[in-house]
Image (tube, rainbow, N blue to C red):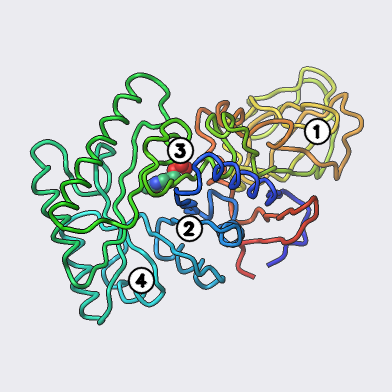
Amino acid sequence: MKSTLKRTWAEIDLDALDYNYQTIRSHIGPNTKFLGVVKADAYGHGSVQIASRLQDLGADYLAVSSIDEAMELRFNGITMPILILGHTPKEQVDRLICFNITQAVTCKAKADEYNQEALKYGGTLKVHIKVDTGMSRLGYLCNDEHFDTGVEGIVEACQWPGLQAEGIFTHFAMADEDNPVGREYTHAQFALFQKVIQAVESKWGQRFAIHHCANTGATVDYPETYLDMVRPGLLLYGYGAYAKKWHLKPLMTMKTTVSTIKVYDPGTHVSYGGIYTTDKKTRMGVIPYGYADGFLRSLSNRCQLMSEDGPVQQRGRICMDMAMIDLTDKWHVDVGSEIEIFGPHQSLDDWAALAGTIPYEIVCAISKRVPRYYYQQGKIISKELLLRM
Ligand SMILES: *Cc1c(COP(=O)(O)O)cnc(C)c1O
């Protein structure tokens, strides 16, 4: 669907994606596979566009969080391997097999269910075994007294005829905590992961084709954890401290426009609750960018956006569909002028820090009514709007 509106939009630079991908590739070397994490609509960038580009670039694997996300890719021309990191109900095993989607197996009970369903369907389900080495979320518990039962459970799953155990993986809880506690925790997780792999493979008598664990933090700071494949998400999109370390480029620029300008007398209350009152004659602009577009309301009255005339203060409460900006003395800014929310002049990382959150949350919060414009070599090559029209 194409948007005809020039309201609020996200520009996504596919050349930056190419650059980031190639740069990460140059760091990981030719013998390490690359899995691109494209869950949550590719962190708000549009999973079909990002996945298509990664497929063309020669990435080895993609990961999403649910079967719906995987099917969206399959229905849109993505033929490369896709791993579902989260849970899939057993009733959908036939679809996983039919569409050649790889499923994470996170415990004995699920391995059993998936195996039975696969046999019922008459196929084999490709799986990656997830080991919980300290994230305490999904995965076979293998620490301390759980080691033997964990290893046994995994070996059992590998031997079941309905499952094809292609990979084994774990997830780091603190690889992006750049401090001694984080480093020690990450090393311990990695040591346990290797111990589990060794025990499983020697009992099973086979080697998993793909061992993987490195998320963004580990890809940059822990090259010893690459094993067969790295699995970064945020790094690829070019945000955060790790992307900065490797001089990667942010993909997204968010922009809005000035829809109305009015001049208020001193003492005028602006927006809900009147938390801002003008202290002088004030030229105030309205932008069609509110919390329903992903503008975090917690930023109300304490953030700035970038106009062609420099930074402008946001004033008063951020509303669902609109917010007000102070354009006093910004005489070049008129109705229709473009305003940068984040991008080259104001980084998403700073924006996230100001909001007391992480860049992940900001890009994931950009809603479906914000169209995404895809750029290649400075030209728009595609526009996407996720509304049902
Ligand atoms: C989201 C996710 C990733 C990617 O994390 P980043 O911090 O964005 O690199 C990797 N592995 C798993 C299991 C995930 O859920």
What whole-number distance in Å separates the C-alpha atoms at marks 1 and 4? 48 Å
Report the quarter where the N terminus lies: bottom right
Image spot of residue 159 (x, y percent) = 16, 65
Mark 1: amino acid: Ser
Q: Residues within 10 Å of mark 4 (few under 14, many from 20)?
A: many
What whole-number distance in Å separates the C-alpha atoms at marks 1 and 2? 41 Å
Label located before the other in sequence (1 or 2):
2
Q: Residue at x 26, y 81 (%)?
A: 121
Q: Residues within 10 Å of mark 2 (few under 14, many from 20)?
A: some
The answer to whether the residue bearing label 3 lies less than 8 angstroms from the nearest atom of ligand 1 is yes
Closer mark to the observer between disc 1 and disc 4: 4
Q: Report the residue marked by disc 4.
A: 96
Q: Report the residue marked by disc 2.
A: 60
Q: Report the residue marked by disc 3.
A: 219
Ligand 1: give its quadrant: top left
Q: Report the residue marked by disc 1.
A: 307
Q: Is residue 102 left or right of residue 70?
A: left
Q: Residue at x 70, y 29 (%)?
A: 314
Circles 1 and 4, Cβ within 8 Å, touching? The answer is no
Circles 1 and 2, Cβ within 8 Å, touching? The answer is no
